[in-house]
Image (tube, rainbow, N blue to C red):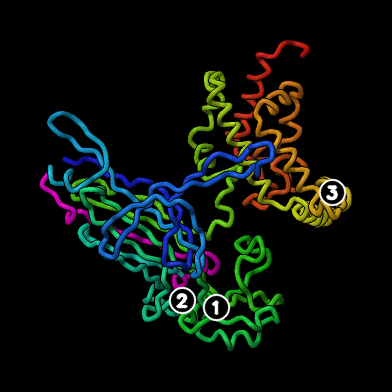
Amino acid sequence: MIEKLWLYPPLAIARLGRSQTPCDSFVWGANDLRPRGTGQTTVQGVTTLHVAEDGTVTSSIPTSIQFKDDAGFRPVCPFFELHGEWRTETGVETGAITPLVLARFGLTVNDLHWKVEVANLKPHHYTLEQSDRITATVEIKGNITQRQLLLGISPQNTPHPLVIADKPLPLGSVQITHPSDEFPEIRLRFTPPKGLVYAPTNLKQRLNGSSTSWQNFELPPEQLIINPDAKWCDFIPTADDPRTAPGGLYAFENDETQKSLGLVDDICDGIISCSLAGVSTAKARIVVSPPDFAPDRRSPVSLADGLSDRIKRDDVLDPAYVDDLNLTAAEIGDLLERVLETMEAMNLDFQNLRAHRTNRAIAIDESVPPEVAANRAFPPMESLRERPLPLTEYGRQRHRRFISLEVFEDMLRERPELISKWIREPMTDEKYYDRKMPALMRGSDAYPMHITRRQYQLLVAWANRLRKDAEAGT
């Protein structure tokens, strides 16, 4: 009998796009690290699944990756594959659930029950009104392979629902694939919405009293669906409301009152589940995000780094872990490559000026001399015709050297203080932007960004291990 079910992956990120064609699958390739190379990460196509209207699956391997077409960005549409554990006369087996596996226990795909629940709770986050929740739910039997729309509405039993049932807000769609001999696995594909903005039905009237920045704002009639009587359309923040920080998180009519304009986007997240009678339900999380404007660049701190920091942070404190220099060097090398990729995507000169302004503003609030605080960041560098972005160019040159890991290793051996002096320690209360790495980058908490504690502890442990083998006095 089947004893356990789970979905793989347990978490996936879908990306908005107006194109009807999903983005092909790709992986990051090797960096172009030739002496005169770009230093950029390459991307290469891998097996990509295509789903027909009836759920039939085919595949191809793209020779090139196209992120946009005439309609706009191509959406990223992740698959969720059903896996399980079952017991037979010979023991316990695990793997993908297929019709053949189900048939061994007298079951079919009809016995599977899928449920997808997604929500956009941004208006509710501000007003805390149940009527401002936007949710969509579909339930599908395992043999239904046609696409199912996720149509978001607000609770209809409330006085003024933000989205009424007659004018739902599209939050994407889902489709179960039809198993075949070539592709016997049971999958569900999530297609995100297009990335549109929706407004109150009386938008034109509201704009007449708004600030000049909204005077020419227009939306097509099919996107004017929001109930103007809903609480969200009259939301005005109270003083120092933390839910509205940082500024610019929602559209407001004018700078004086900051009254909400009532706009709602179609980003959402939610839960995908699959159940079978007598077995615990398999669940996975789907998150919708904007398109990736630098898909060939990786961040120094990824989602995987954040998860590893929560469940594997102490691994790097075990001396046996850093004794495996091949393993730890590969981790450090990957981190340095991602740092360079981030540098290649940044305008450091602009970010440095922004850091100076931010430091001055913080200093004024704290009665500290503004110029002293501003100068914690890098000194501005004069632009020349041949070097319009001098700090950016300098930073990229410096970090490209570290891609050769031997250079970074030698530097750590020679300068034991390097990490504490030049890399920002996690979980500090430092508000000012300084020259510590990752420099000039803003974290999600509005403070200067830092790497995870696991990454920092690994750097420290790895550097200590390198110096352990160094000859004294060298």
Please give the residue where the numbered disc 3 appears in the rendered image.
373
Residue 269: x percent and y percent?
44, 59
Quadrant position of residue 396:
top right
For marks 3 and 2 on the same chain, the one whose residue lies earlier in the sequence:
2
Can you say whether 203 is above or below 255 in the image? Answer: below
Disc 1 residue type (three-letter): Cys
Q: Residue at x 78, y 43 (%)?
A: 394
Residue 13: x percent and y percent?
46, 53
CA neighbours of label 1 inside 10 A, class few (<14), some (14 to 19), many (20+): many
Disc 3 residue type (three-letter): Ala
Element class at badge 3: helix
Give the position of the C terminus as an image quadrant: top right
Q: Is residue 222 magenta?
A: no
Can you say whether 352 is above or below 193 in the image? Answer: above
Residues 66 and 151: in front is 66
Quadrant position of residue 451:
top right
Please give the residue where the numbered disc 1 appears in the rendered image.
233
Q: Residue at x 26, y 49 (%)?
A: 183
Residue 191: x percent and y percent?
39, 61
> What distance separates the C-alpha of mark 1 from that of mark 2?
8 Å
